Image (cartoon, helix red, strand yellow):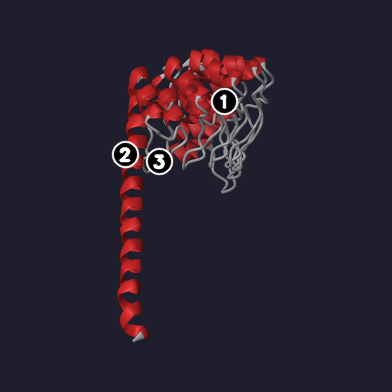
Amino acid sequence: MVFRTSWPVVCKSKMMALLMAVVALWASAAMAGVNEDLCLAAWHGDLREVKRLIAKGADVNAKVSKYGLTALMHASMNGDREVMQELLSKGAEVNAKNNDGRTALMFASIWDHPQVVQELLSRGAEVNAKDDRGETALMLVSLHGDRQVVQQLLSMGAEVNAKNIQGKTALMLASTRGDRRVVQLLLSKGAEINAKDDESKTALMFASIHGDRQVVQELLSKGAEVNAKDDEGKTALMLASMHDDRQVVQVLLSRGAEVNARDNQGKTALMLVSRRGVHLGVKRLLIKAGAK
């Protein structure tokens, strides 16, 4: 008799639990949709819609998409200061990180939004925070962004000689990009001109690889070691020669590059370009300078 009366009760209890789970799942999905709408509104700079969705219960710190971006990050990329201020006033975490460890400040820096950068810094954004690759906002903007943002970050305490997980500094990244004005600014703020990354490459080597004659000249004029060697024993001259950059080779030779220096395998710049089939212009420059 006990079993006959308890069975319907047990079934009813399970049904209620299942129903509650379904309702909770639906509510969660609905809220996820609201959070995605908030990020979309922030991206488009739609302040009115942002306010409406927040009033509706959207989570200002929810992370959406496979990249884990928050509404504040979307607003920072878009450069909408008013939307960003609204999100911050409603509790958006200024130093939240996405799935790659990047913050709103990093996104605003990369996308060249100096006003947004300034606002985030005034709201407590960590200027020296690092992403999963060990890169700071200063490193990212040195490679991708604008000189004005570089200046802002430096004025707010950005560490000019910080290194990423590969040992690269902002100066190395700016030299890779070939931005002479950013290179000049970083040097004026104390960037170590002969710092080496994990492969012992210097800013001069990166500028030589990527063929920027003006940056090479700037670095040499500020004391870059023209004959420094990386872990393979290669110099800036060897690297520039291998990349078939006649102008950079000419500058390096004029500033004292050792034309017959040898790498760890005993090869000179001339041997390296001969093996690679580089154009005759670089070979002629090297031979004229005494290459053997």
48 vs 130, left or right, is left
Count of numbered tags? 3
User: Which residue is the site of mark 1?
Assistant: 138
Mark number, residue 1: none
167 relative to 282, above or below = below
Q: Nearer the viewer, residue 28 or 87?
A: 28
**SS at circle 3:** loop
Mark number, residue 33: 2
**SS at circle 2:** helix
Estimate the spatial distance between the alpha carbons at disc 3 and disc 2, rounded to whole Å: 16 Å
Q: Which amino acid does label 1 sit on?
A: Leu
How crowded pointer 3 is (Cα within 10 Å; few <14, some 14-19, many 20+) is rated as few
148 relative to 134, above or below = above
Res. 247 visible in picture: no
Q: What residue type is labelled 2?
A: Gly
Q: Quadrant of the N terminus?
A: bottom left
Estimate the spatial distance between the alpha carbons at disc 2 and disc 1, rounded to whole Å: 34 Å
Q: Nearer the viewer, mark 1 or mark 3?
A: 3
Quarter of the image holding residue 128? Answer: top right
Percent of width and height locating residue 179:
49, 18
Instruction: Name which of mark 1 and mark 3 comes first in the sequence.
Output: 3
182 relative to 268, above or below = above
Residue under the image location 64 percent in, 15 percent down = 155
Q: Which of marks 3 and 2 is in front?
A: 2
User: Which residue is the site of mark 3?
Assistant: 67
How crowded pointer 2 is (Cα within 10 Å; few <14, some 14-19, many 20+) is rated as few
